[in-house]
Image (cartoon, helix red, strand yellow):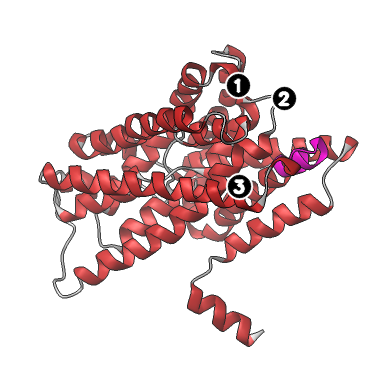
Amino acid sequence: MAILDALRSRLRIDPYLLLLIGTVGFAALLPARGAAAGMVGVAVNLAVALLFLLYGARLKPEAIVSGLSHWRLQSLIFASTYILFPAIGVGLSLLLRGHLPKDVVTGLMFLCLLPSTVQSSIAFTSIARGNVPGALCSASLSNMLGVILTPILVSQLLPAASGGFSLKALEDIALQILLPFIVGQAVRPWLGEWLLRHSLLTSVVDRGSVLVVVYAAFSAGMVAGIWHQLSPASIAVILLIDLVVLAIVICSTTWVSRALAFSKEDEIAIVFCGSKKSMAGGIPMATILFPGHAIGLIVLPLMLFHQAQLFVCATLARRYADRGRDTARAPATVGSNDARRCQSQSSAPIVS
């Protein structure tokens, strides 16, 4: 065990990655069938609702309002998340059509339409000594807007897979994600401080809900017999495509932030917030937006991208931090007063 722990420490393997792999393996060996599948479906709905209820209970509404004041930073991150990424997705769809399974191509497009993460964006920005308050506000806004924007973008860019614009899909997402968030906001005066003191609970719900949803998605794939469509080589190709997409976005956001003369702290926030995609929000949305489809294949690009972004951004964050180690920089940025106010009014959200 000591040897395994030392190896894991040296390779910097995220234990959560091992849990995800284990969940996929468990779904392959013991997929939920029949009545068990129905129980798993109920568990998924409850886990996701609880996740967003806790998110709403932790995030003060003043944080979003204050974050809007740093409009240049917010606009560039928004453009990366909801303009650059979708444009890349359209290009991938045209290039890969006929070369990969249809549901995988759909999954790559869907990946590009999702909001940014919150937890990892803030964590990497902090490690890199960037504008943490700006990252917190931007990532939170991205997730809230994503509840509306992602279904609309899916209906326009993936009409065949999603069935076009569906008020039912928006209603389901509102009931499963937005309503619990609103309830969380309503009970925040009573639960907010308690949740801050018990961060382990929110972390368990955050990561545990994703594991439950991943198990449900991959169980459905096993029962439907879809996994014979993919070889190890095909999975490697999907991972390579994810890495190329991530590289394009990181390079683009870095270049644009420097061309527009953002401070180094703002550049760091832009790079880390603008290059992330949320698995915690994406997989529940996929189960609603693509009913009857091979969800396991559709969310596979997202799962691989999620792990790729963790490894790549962890390395990039350490490089940013090492470069600024000799000069102790305070996070004074464009709009920094508003950003600090945002930080003082907020708490670390939980959606990853």
**Number of residues whose C-alpha sits closer than 10 Å to that of mark 3, classed few (under 14), some (14–19) or many (20 or more):** few
- Which of the 4 image quadrants contains residue 124? bottom left
Depth-wise, is mark 2 or mark 3 nearer the camera? 3
Residue 337, image x and y in percent?
Answer: 16, 47
Q: Is residue 149 left or right of residue 251?
A: right
Residue appearing at x 53%, y 69% in the figure: 13
**Number of residues whose C-alpha sits closer than 10 Å to that of mark 2, classed few (under 14), some (14–19) or many (20 or more):** few
Q: Which residue is mark 3?
A: 234
In the picture as drawn, the residue positioned furthest to the right comes out as: 35
Residue appearing at x 35%, y 49% in the figure: 247
Q: Which residue is mark 1?
A: 161
Indicate the amino acid at tag 3: Ser
Is residue 62 something that shows in the picture?
A: yes
Q: Nearer the viewer, residue 330 or 166?
A: 166
In the picture as drawn, the residue positioned furthest to the bottom comes out as: 2
Element on which disc 2 rests: loop
Say whether marks 1 and 3 touch (CB < 8 Å): no
The residues tagged by marks 1 and 2 sit, at their Cα atoms, a distance apart of: 10 Å
Q: Which residue is mark 2?
A: 292
Element on which disc 3 rests: helix
**Number of residues whose C-alpha sits closer than 10 Å to that of mark 1, classed few (under 14), some (14–19) or many (20 or more):** some
Q: What segment is highlighted magenta in the picture?
A: 217-226
Indicate the amino acid at tag 2: Gly
